[in-house]
Image: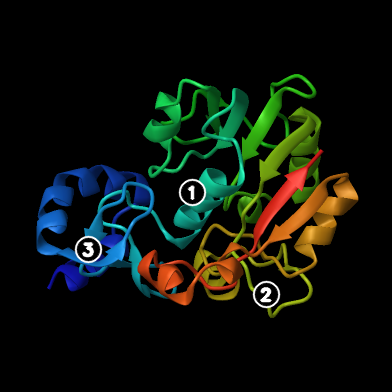
Amino acid sequence: MIKKAFKFFLNRIPRPILIRLSYLAKPFLLLSLKGDRYTDPIDGKSFSKFLPYGYEHQRENVLSPSTLSLERHRLLWLYLKEHTNFFTEPHKVLHFAPEQAFYKRFRKLKNLDYTTTDLHSPLADVKADICDLPFEDNSFDFILCNHVLEHIPDDDKAMSELYRVLSPGGTAILQIPQDLKREKTFEDDSITDPKERAKIFGQYDHVRVYGRDYFDKLRSIGFHVEEVDLTSHLEPEIVDRYRLAKGEIIPVARK
């Protein structure tokens, strides 16, 4: 019943409104999904199952009822926690389109000088176009820009701006929706119908679907790119418990 209701609202209510409504529904979700089968590593809470999520294609058991995190958010959290000094050393951080699962948690970290940016998000400190950023060169130690570039028509310009504002030795984590079976990125500017875009690109406001050449495109901008397959180093039961996407690559780009 809960799953059917969630699917109904997910497909009919704009995401910003859905997020606000989710806070009202959260106490009921937490109670109804109480259990210990699956765990959200971001807050450590466990549930009998996670919620479904997806626009064009629903994925079952992927949305955490407590943090509203998806597979990519939990994977990023584990990487930052276990393989970087993000949580322990001073960093100047730029976070694009800040995710609900991270925003308040990162804002509370005393070691971070934390700035959020987006053209439309109400969580953004700075309203800015990713292709024309109002920041000086070499400004940030860490940049988080996840599931953004597939929305940007001129992603070359966006990548160049990310490289420009990243400090030497800095790290940019630039996650995208992945189809690792696809070698070449596909885009077609003539596809403008939202339904057609959703069918071809996976979401109504995406303008391309990236292939494995994405990593080389980042390298052509100047980044040194590490393709991190964190799940290959985790036990299968941990991948399942945290509801991670097996084989998802974290693009870690350095300057």
Q: Is residue 219 above or below residue 20?
A: below
Q: Residue at x 80, y 66 (%)?
A: 213
Pointer 1 or 2: first along the chain:
1
For label 2, the SS is loop
In this picture the colour scheme is rainbow
Spot occupied by residue 225 in the image (x, y as percentages of width and height): 79, 52
Please give the residue where the numbered disc 1 appears in the rendered image. 77
**Screen quadrant of the N terminus:** bottom left
Q: Badge 1: how crowded within 10 Å, few (<14), some, or many (20+)? A: some
- Kind of residue indicated by mark 3: Phe
Mark drawn on residue 47: 3
Q: Is residue 130 above or below residue 79?
A: above
Spot occupied by residue 254 in the image (x, y as percentages of width and height): 78, 42
- Kind of residue indicated by mark 2: Leu
Q: Tell me: 192 left or right of 242.
A: right
Question: Which image quadrant for residue 241?
Answer: bottom left
Mark pair 1, 3: CA separation: 19 Å
Q: Is residue 109 above or below residue 226?
A: above
Question: Which image quadrant for residue 202?
Answer: bottom right
Spot occupied by residue 5 in the image (x, y as percentages of width and height): 17, 67
Please give the residue where the numbered disc 2 appears in the rendered image. 180
- Kind of residue indicated by mark 1: Trp
Pointer 3 or 2: first along the chain:
3
Pointer 1 with pointer 2, Cβ within 8 A: no
Mark pair 3, 2: CA separation: 30 Å
